[in-house]
Amino acid sequence: MLSVISRARKSLGRAAFALAAVALAACQPATGPGAGGPTVDSSAPVIVALLVPSGSGQASDELLARSLQNAARLAISDLGNTRIDLRVYNTAGQPATAQAMATKAIDDGAKIILGPVFAQEANAAGAAAAARGINVLAFSNNPDIAGRNVFILGPTFSNTATRLASYAVRNGKRRIMVVHEQNTAGQLGRAAIEQGIARAGGSVVGVGSYEFSQNGVVSAAPRLAATARDNSADAVFLTADTAGALPLVSQLLSENGLGPAVTQFIGLTRWDIPQGTLALPGVQGGWFALPDPALYQQYQSRYQTAFGEPPHPISGLAYDGIAAIGALLKQGRSNALTGQALTQSAGFVGVNGIFRLRSDGQNERGLAVAQIRNNQVVIIDPAPRSFGGFGS
């Protein structure tokens, strides 16, 4: 118990920056109808701008920038005769620089912008590109910046919550309690879960929260467990992540009488990263969602072979963006990169599985549902391979 609390104390501290980044709202969210787009000649190389966070002085940003470039080039090599002229622009992770680089890229002939990573950057780049009729496929997962000419490629709380809630309700877990942190990320996660449960036809039978600190989790756990029992909850849907409160909150809820034998734990975030999380006693039996593992493992292996290092977890979004652009250009239409084309209902296939872009700038991804059993990840509902089975 003491080791779990010690780990959680460190995790809660490390998580502060990550959660702030997830919750970061853009200054001027892009809203409005779906974007148009430029005319392209798909018989000639099409210029695609890739905006990466290099130049910030942070080693983590340099690693991410390199991995995004490598992933994009790997995707281009898979396109066959479809020709993309990739131009890379460094943003230093700064909105003003991202805006300037987006303008420069369009001046250089870019027909679409891939990136940048951070929400305020993407918002600034989107504003610059909107004035020129160019669409942006950002690596952000922040729905606040999606819309008009900005499409986000990052996995969203809404998509994950809907997938898991649908699976839960279909498997008899209809009475669900939501447990979240008392911060912006927790509130966003709570809203996504509640909407997902409503779409799936389940019932939110209780909502509980805790202060985002070690003492906050410890003091709240008995009350949260009692609420779940009093409301006969079939499942508890947690917003906590592995870098934050998950190790402690899952353990303490279990010690207060909840757990897979009584109440199913469901996680809004990935519970398999880092791998050491799989050994935690509180997450055993828990459900979470993840991209198609078979496809992503193939990507990891190919990337390692090609570049001599493992890919950054976010890098697959650059591959997916190029895969979508290439698939549209292969159709040979002059309107291949318009908003209407980007939001085709059939979607695309990337290293994370199937995905499609919505007219509101958000995305839908086909996810697998996994369970942690004996410290290992077991797929209990495979990711769909087409949108005919999406969200099933």
Image: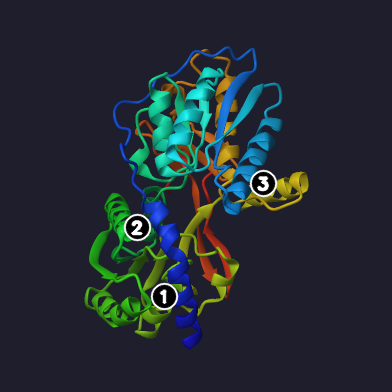
Label 2 to label 3: alpha-carbon separation = 30 Å
Q: Could you say where residue 213 lies in the image, as x and y percent from the top left?
A: 36, 74
The residue singled out by tag 3 in the image is 299
- Left or right position of 205 against 336: left
Earlier along the polypeptide chain: callout 1 or callout 3?
A: 1
Give the camera-side residue of 59 and 137. 59
Which quadrant of the view contains residue 331? top right
Q: Could you say where residue 386 lies in the image, as x and y percent from the top left?
A: 51, 39
The residue singled out by tag 1 in the image is 250
Residue under the image location 35 percent in, 84 percent down: 257
Q: Height in image: 148 above or below 161?
A: above
The residue singled out by tag 2 in the image is 185
Residue under the image location 60 percent in, 19 percent down: 46
Q: Could you say where residue 78 lies in the image, as x and y percent from the top left?
A: 69, 32
Which mark's residue is nearer the viewer, 2 or 3?
Answer: 2
Label 1 to label 3: alpha-carbon separation = 32 Å
